[in-house]
Image (cartoon, grey):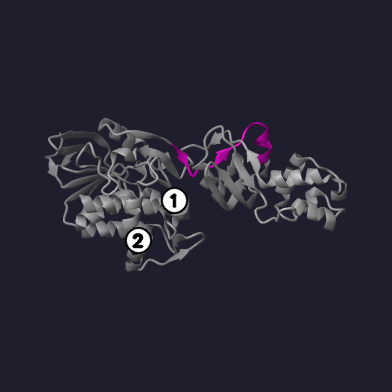
Amino acid sequence: MAEALQNYDAIVLGAGGAGLMCAAVAGQRGRRVLVVDHSDEPGRKILISGGGRCNFTNIHAAPDRYISANPHFMKSALGRYTPDDFIALVDAYGIAWHEKTLGQLFCDGSARQIVALLMDECAKGGVAFAFGDAIAAVDHADGRFRVTHGGRVSEAPALVVATGGPSIPKIGATGFAYDLARRFGLKIVEPRPALVPLTLGGDEVLFRSLSGVATEVVAQAGKGRFREAALFTHKGLSGPAILQASSYWRHGEPVGIDFLPDAPTGWALAAKRERPRATLRSLLSAMLPDRLAETLAERVNLPGDLANLPDKGLADVERRLGDWRFHPSGTEGFAKAEVTIGGISTDGLSSRTMEARAVPGLYAIGEAVDVTGWLGGYNFQWAWASGWAAGQAL
């Protein structure tokens, strides 16, 4: 038999970064808040992020580093809660941090420090928690939301959907947010894996033999162009440059790789003049990991000394190595995706409050929404900013 009805000002579904931030902000504003999560502990995605050190924000966070069907939607929240704001919170807790590369900020210690910070902020606001509670039902009538969870029934005039997307199902991620949003008439932008390794098939399978080889490249897919490391795997391509490009990649499209981003125009012809007895293989080995150089030289198939190779052939090699086209067979899916692109359409939400226009009191934040950041702390900054925006509005 279910327990007596419990009343709150707001119920937050999901104890990830966005949900905890929202609950803390609303709680400290005097709202009675309940956070419900089917996991036994909060912040599971935070705990595994950044190799366990949590890449908690990026100092370069700006709207143009996010992907959404509406490229303007995230401007309000990101503008009102900035990386500096979260850094100030981290500093207030005495958590040591460092910048790794490209504006990425990590804890010196453990990601658990970020979860502890958020839980402490929630405690300051008197936030109640229901961990390990599966959500059995969500009902809405007379301007109130009723959530049945773990044998209990809780009710509030505001409901915040902060259950994320389906990426990394091994930590309990599901498409729950989408099912709930559809029930309330909100549209969904087709979800797909993002920040995810790409797979190679067909005659590109031979590149899998390079598993473990990494090199700095410029990777391009669609409008995305990123200079970072690429890593060959036993399934295809990974590494930061590839994960970034994957968010812009669509099935059937190529991914362009510049294997020699620092090589000047005309480098092959210059080498022919300066080292006529060298081979293309030895030339590439001086600039790339040996196994990669060997494979690329085989694919280009220009054997012999540089002196005996036609200028046109060498110019073609330059062009190919500067924009080597891979045709991925797919991705490694949600199981390996760090985040989800797509989700609850921003068309039905207020960019200032994250509230659904057609359903007063219903909010959606974090990864559940169709806003996806680049690799490197951007998605956490969206979690903090969107959670803060909703928490201010509750």
Nearest to the observer: residue 74 or residue 116: 74
Label 2 environment density (alpha carbons within 10 Å; few <14, some 14–19, many ≥20): some
Image point 17% across, 41% down: which residue? 154
Q: Which mark is residue 64?
A: 1
x 19%, y 43%: residue: 158
In the image, residue 100 lies at what x, y percent?
50, 62
Dot label at residue 376: none
Residue ID at (30%, 41%): 38
> Which region shows up in magenta?
192-208
The one nearer the camera, 274 or 149, is 274
| Disc 1 to disc 2, C-alpha distance | 20 Å
Queried whether the magenta region covers residue 231, the answer comes back as no
**Residues at discs 1 and 2 in contact (Cβ within 8 Å):** no
Q: Nearer the viewer, residue 212 or 207?
A: 207
Q: Position of residue 390 (x, y in %)?
A: 26, 49
Q: Secondary structure at mark 1?
A: helix
Looking at the rendered image, the quarter that the N terminus falls into is top left
Q: Is residue 50 visible?
A: yes
Pinpoint residue 357: horizontal percent, then vertical percent.
24, 39
For label 2, the SS is: helix
As drawn, 276 above or below 92:
above
Q: Earlier in the sequence, mark 1 or mark 2?
A: 1
Q: Which residue is mark 2?
A: 86
Q: Amino acid at mark 1?
A: Asp
Question: Which is closer to the viewer, label 1 or label 2?
Answer: 1
